């Protein structure tokens, strides 16, 4: 091959590196979008592109607008934070938020005797939440109990507000249909009971729920899927049906007892599944708090699990992913104790490379490109010198063949 051909090949090699390396890194790793946040346990996108998020421990609802975290909270609500699962928890925006500005949050409070779980509705006036009205109140029956509060909120395609409420470590309440504890509840946007609820006059939609903090609907078929934390084993993912009894505490995990609805997936050892978001075509993404990762869940058309793949480890054990939300750009967004990340779901891989902050990934990319350029230049110079030496005593062809082999070796190594 002529020298010009080799130079052209070297340039092509550089271009290949430049085009491949950054796109692989950008697509496969979650990208840290907002850092320095204070325990953003839930967040939602408004129709006009803002993000509202709850700070679990402060009671602040915060606003991110045009990429800026506004210094003044949207609202600050009283919260009890005596336990690590308490505070300002779930958030939902009204289906008519664009016109009525209603924001719903779930919070725990203490009245001097008992802890309560409240759903409070605020009205957005610009970036300020006003006129808080509590539309739901459940009493934790055990005065000293701090755990299993539930607290996740989601509007369904039926425009009803769904809430996960834990059993407050009072296990039998989950099987007691006269209690709102240990249930998935369905309510009108003002907290009243819908006339078409499965139990007349009751908010109960499904029961036998231990404690969960994540659910979402498949908009194509209305299916509701939830994550639920198990005891020392059997975390669950469930497809929720009205009047479904999900077993707790009589059955944990799969029991093949027709009295109970079995989960579609279980996790032992536990991972503490958290927020879950529908993405597209039977595909969901859910977070793990204990397992500290984002995962892709694919369902078959029958609703059974086709696959569960770890996208990327993130954070540390017991310090992982909180909420997971589908963004208006069709990327998956998820929160951790201190930030919000985005993930491009078009990346087809399963287990991704070890997570690294985006800035580090960029540096690695530039480093690889620099190595590629340097090695190619060194090779071209080396070839020029060798060619000058060999032209007087050897045929050209063998040297060219060796050079091509060397270049291919370089390509394969870089
Ligand atoms: Ca169950």
Image: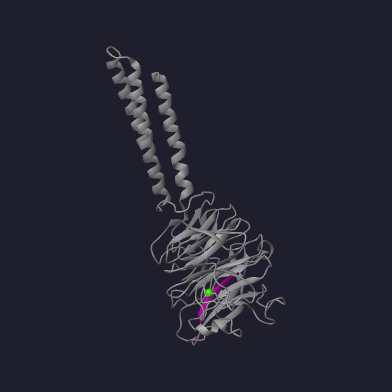
Magenta residues, dominant SS class: strand
Does the magenta segment cover residue 354? no
Colouring scheme, one of rainbow, by chain, secondary structure, one colour: one colour
Q: Residue furthest top?
A: 392
Q: Residue furthest right?
A: 195
Q: Residue at x 45, y 80 (%)?
A: 146
Q: Residue at x 44, y 29 (%)?
A: 12
Which of the image's four quarters has the N terminus?
top left
Q: Residue at x 40, y 42 (%)?
A: 365
Give the number of callouts: 0
Residue bounds of the magenta highlight: 103-111
Q: Is residue 97 visible?
A: yes
Q: Residue at x 42, y 74 (%)?
A: 232
**In the rendered image, the vertical position of residue 376 relative to residue 175, given as above or below:** above
Residue 414 picture location, percent across and down: 37, 37
Judging depth in this view, the residue of 249 and 381 nearest the camera is: 249
Residue 224 picture location, percent across and down: 61, 67
**In the rendered image, the vertical position of residue 12 relative to residue 338, given as above or below:** above
Left or right: residue 392 versus residue 215 is left
Residue 343 picture location, percent across and down: 50, 53
**In the rendered image, the vertical position of residue 399 relative to residue 22, given as above or below:** above
Q: Is residue 53 visible?
A: no
Residue 267 picture location, percent across and down: 46, 67
**In the rendered image, the vertical position of residue 355 relative to residue 43, given as above or below:** above
Does the magenta segment cover residue 106? yes
């Amino acid at each position: 091959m002529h020298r010009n051909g080799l130079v052209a090949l070297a340039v092509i090699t550089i271009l290949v590196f430049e085009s491949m390396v950054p796109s692989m890194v950008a697509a496969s790793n979650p990208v840290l979008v907002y850092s320095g946040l204070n325990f953003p346990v839930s967040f939602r996108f408004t129709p006009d592109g803002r993000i509202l998020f709850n700070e679990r421990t402060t009671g602040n609802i915060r606003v991110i607008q045009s990429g800026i975290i506004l210094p003044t909270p949207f609202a600050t609500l009283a919260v009890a934070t005596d336990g690590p699962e308490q505070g300002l928890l779930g958030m939902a925006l009204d289906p008519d938020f664009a016109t009525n500005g209603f924001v719903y949050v779930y919070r725990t409070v203490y009245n001097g005797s008992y802890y309560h779980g409240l759903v409070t509705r605020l009205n957005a006036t610009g970036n300020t939440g006003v006129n808080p009205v509590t539309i739901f109140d459940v009493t934790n029956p055990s005065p000293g109990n701090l755990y299993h509060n539930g607290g996740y909120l989601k509007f369904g395609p039926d425009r009803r507000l769904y809430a996960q409420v834990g059993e407050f470590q009072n296990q039998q309440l989950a099987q007691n249909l006269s209690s709102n504890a240990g249930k998935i509840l369905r309510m009108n946007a003002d907290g009243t009971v819908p006339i078409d609820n499965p139990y007349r006059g009751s908010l109960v939609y499904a029961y036998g729920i231990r404690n969960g903090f994540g659910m979402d609907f498949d908009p194509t078929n209305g299916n509701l899927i939830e994550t639920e934390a198990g005891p020392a084993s059997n975390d669950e993912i469930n497809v929720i049906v009205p009047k479904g009894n999900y077993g707790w505490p009589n059955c944990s995990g799969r029991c093949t007892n027709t009295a109970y609805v079995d989960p579609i997936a279980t996790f032992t050892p536990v991972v503490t599944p958290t927020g879950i978001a529908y993405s597209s075509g039977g595909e969901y993404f859910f977070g793990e708090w204990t397992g500290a990762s984002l995962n892709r869940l694919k369902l078959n058309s029958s609703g059974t699990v086709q696959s569960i793949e770890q996208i990327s480890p993130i954070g540390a054990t017991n310090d992982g992913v909180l909420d997971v939300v589908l963004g208006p750009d069709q990327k998956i967004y998820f929160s951790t104790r201190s930030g919000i990340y985005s993930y491009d779901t078009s990346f087809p891989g399963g287990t991704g490379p070890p997570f690294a902050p985006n800035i580090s990934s960029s540096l690695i990319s530039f480093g690889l490109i620099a190595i590629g350029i340097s090695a190619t230049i060194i090779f071209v110079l080396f070839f020029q010198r060798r060619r000058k030496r060999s032209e007087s005593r050897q045929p050209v062809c063998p040297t060219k063949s060796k050079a091509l082999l060397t270049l291919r070796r370089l390509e394969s190594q870089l």
